Image: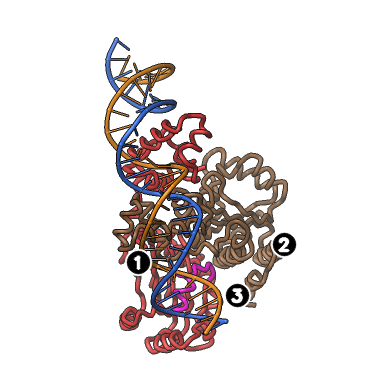
Chain colours: A red, B brown, C blue, D orange
Amino acid sequence: MSDLDLFEPLLNCGTVEELHTTTASIAGQLGFDHFIYGVQVNTSLTRPYQFILNGYPKEWRARYVEHNYQEVDPTYSHCITRRRAIPVIWDSRVFTGDKAAKMRNESKEFGLQCGASFAVHGGHGEAAMLSLASSQDTSKAEQNIVSIIGKSQLLACYLHEATQRIVLSKGSLLLTKMELTLREKECLLWAAEGKTGGEIADILKITERTVTFHLQNAGNKMGASNRQHAIARAISMGLIAP
Amino acid sequence: MSDLDLFEPLLNCGTVEELHTTTASIAGQLGFDHFIYGVQVNTSLTRPYQFILNGYPKEWRARYVEHNYQEVDPTYSHCITRRRAIPVIWDSRVFTGDKAAKMRNESKEFGLQCGASFAVHGGHGEAAMLSLASSQDTSKAEQNIVSIIGKSQLLACYLHEATQRIVLSKGSLLLTKMELTLREKECLLWAAEGKTGGEIADILKITERTVTFHLQNAGNKMGASNRQHAIARAISMGLIAP
DNA sequence: TTTTACCCTGTAATATTTTACAGCTATCTA
DNA sequence: TAGATAGCTGTAAAATATTACAGGGTAAAA
């Protein structure tokens, strides 16, 4: 069975439950006993949306949340906060600092003997991470992690892809038949580049009044309340592009 | 030699030249004769910044650029335009359509017999892809690609990480200096939602003056000339996600 | 021929943003 | 303790954007 066949089932999942069992199965085939996948989308920056697929022992997960370990977890800061692209293998050098070391030691009591964390960043600003752990405390288990680190990273990619389709696409912006005229797009594009109405007028060889007119029409079509809103929507919806 | 030792040299590169030779070496060890890595940052909508590390035959690269094949290349649209997270193996099913098939056939004349493309998306809105190709036209070469697809994906991650450090964090892009504070992001987000300074002030329970202050700081960090520009950049670069 | 879509322009009051000046507090780290 | 960073606030003039009124044209489709 090739690696691709291994991940294929993820692309066929339709529900969160399927996603969970399928991921658990694949992680198991790679030699991992536990997994946890989390994705964060900054829909609201004060309360970012988080989706978590938990394959960790419930007790440990509860403790993690209760003690707000996310704040001190170096794997979280590596993957999500700092948005690094490379994986991090759980190592004593990783868990530096008293709080992090304490957290790591506690996690071992719940069966997370060794493991690694993998980052995936989506093209729409979302940050995700997959942690895979083994309950075996042997050098053989550690060596296994290194030897299949590529497959593990790929699992993170496939899982993220599937999550995006099943979970994250719900709130996506609707690309309806919103059609902007040429002039509207031109004005929006220049406005998005920071040009003022007067400057756009000079560029397009029309009056400032007409620029206002086109931007107003574009805004109305998109339900925008002002120029900034119109620009934000146009970009988000992919209506203006080079 | 473990996989991690294989990629380690990438993290020690200091120049673009080192990056090139190191990547070529690793790709070679994986059995690939050619590679190309490209990253795109939407600092500006009209002129996105592109950095390319070319390990393809120069003649083919020149032809690709000349004929603007980027427009029809399904691997480009998969990785960059659609921002998928999973790799794509070059397959006749991938290169559908006359133009894409024609391009693919031409590429074979330049020694790109089989290969695959890997996407990496950074945490700052940049979209990157790595294509790896073999000049051997055998089923064995194709099987090799599948068997090392995990390592290849990992190479893409490490290469992107190194590029981010060496190229993207310098010059006018300043991705590292582009760290926005929580307040700056909050203000930008609400401004992008069409709120005025006064409205944002009410939402965040601060004065309108302070909202102006944060938006000004955010704009300066991103080199924006006004509020609209700041919003456009923040969205394009994935710094905020409305 | 009428309708429709797109494009263009004017005036003027009002609302909002930009800019330049200035100063405050709190926290963390070297 | 000093410095850096983040957050917060004030005033006031000047520049821009928004809004509501008004009007004009062309070209293609119904």
Write the start and end of the magenta stretch as one range. Answer: A73-86
Q: Disc 1 residue type?
A: Gln
Residue C22: x %, y % from top left: 47, 64
Q: Nearer the viewer, residue C28 or B109?
A: C28
In the rendered structure, which amino acid carries the disc numbered 3?
Leu
Are the residues flagged by discs 3 and 2 from a single subunit?
yes
Q: Which residue is mark 3?
A: B4
- Label 1 crowding class (10 Å Cα cut-off): few <14, some 14-19, many 20+? some
Residue that mark 2 sits on: B17
Residue receiving disc 1:
A50
| Image height of A232 relative to B200, above or below | above
Q: Nearer the viewer, mark 3 or mark 1?
A: 1
At 45% across and 86% down in the image, what residue appears?
A: A113
Mark 3, other Cα within 10 Å: few <14 / some 14–19 / many ≥20 = some
Same subunit, tags 3 and 1: no
The answer to whether tags 1 and 2 share a subunit is no
Element under disc 3: helix
Snapshot quadrant of residue B7: bottom right
- What distance separates the C-alpha of mark 3 from that of mark 2? 21 Å
